[in-house]
Amino acid sequence: MKRKLRLSRVLLVAAAILLGLVIALPFLWVVSASLQTETGIFRRPPSWLPDPVTIDNYGYVFTGKIPEAYAARGLLRSTVTQEAQYLPIGLQNSVMVATSVVLINLLLGTLAAYTFARERFRGQAAAFSFILTSRLLPGMAVAIPTYMIIRQLGLLDSKTALVLIYSAFTLPFTIWVLTLYFRSLPRDYEEAAQVDGCTRFQALRHIVLPLAAPGLAAVGAFSFLFSYDEFLFALLTTSSLNSKTVPVMIATISVNPDASYTLIAVGIVLSIIAPIILATIFRRFITSGLVSSLGRA
């Protein structure tokens, strides 16, 4: 029996290590490629460790200064030069859009979820079911109607359009998760606060929201990551630097026949910094919030 348990543990650890390698190796290779020269990345046999290490690729994206290795060999074409320097603008647009979507989700989603969790009104079950089923629609199914609506509103090629679209896609999940979370919280604290003179809104703000912090962190992270990574609607509704997000800009560089692989790698590395920081800071809250909410579903 003990031997079987040890064997099972060894197999489980081996599977976990293998899964970790499958997930981590592509990211490690991208980081390595971003620190190499264009000639170094095509070296045979390929090297996992850049030799020599260079940060000129990052300097080029942010300052426009062409790396000496590229200039000497004539490897960097003007088309790539122009597109790669727009990556910081795309990062800024992505962060602004994603942050706006998070704020909308936390504000509107919290109020709606608290209403579903604590109030009883006619059509409540139907409204809640409609919210859940609307989240099941794939984005491609509503891409054309959404585009037509955005065009009629005169919001094409604007960050506002992306904020509205992403909020519509993320709010159902936010309302569902927070409704389950609020229902799991005891009413005693809210009732005691109301006896002491607090209004319903004050009880929500000072009592419920601090207790629901893990759930708020989980839906906030989900909203941010969805909005930050989304590609389809960003491609359909944006066309200028004022509104293009970083996934669209990386795609623009990668489909260019003159694409520099090292600059594509730089774009990928820069694009994953914000999600990594978010996951690192709120890891504990995200995990506990999702587990608690889904466990009560």
Image (cartoon, helix red, strand yellow):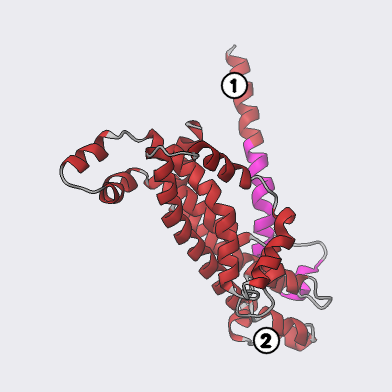
- As drawn, the residue found furthest toward the left would be 196
Marks counted in the figure total: 2
Q: Residue at x 74, y 73 (%)?
A: 252
Secondary structure character of the magenta stretch overall: helix
Residue shown at the point (71%, 56%) measured from the top left: 142
Magenta part of the protein: which range? Answer: 16-43
Residue 253 falls in image quadrant: bottom right
* First in sequence: mark 2 vs mark 1: 1
Give neighbour class at mark 2: few <14, some 14-19, many 20+ (Cα, 10 Å): some
- Residue 149 in the image: x percent, y percent? 66, 66
Give the amino acid at mark 2.
Answer: Ile
- Visible residue check, residue 266: no
- The quarter of the picture where residue 13 lies is top right
Give SS at disc 1: helix
Q: Residues under labels 2 and 1: Cα distance?
A: 56 Å
**In front: mark 2 or mark 1?**
2
Tell me if 49 is positioned left or right of 295 in this view. Answer: right
As drawn, the label of residue 66 is: 2
Q: Residues within 10 Å of mark 1 (few under 14, many from 20)?
A: few
Looking at numbered disc 1 in the image, what kind of residue is underneath it?
Arg
**Camera-nearest residue between 105 and 228:** 105
Q: Secondary structure at mark 2?
A: loop
Horizontal arrangement in the rendering, residue 274 relative to residue 282 (left or right)? right
Q: On the image, numbered disc 1 is attached to which residue?
A: 6
Vertical arrangement, residue 86 with respect to residue 182, above or below = below
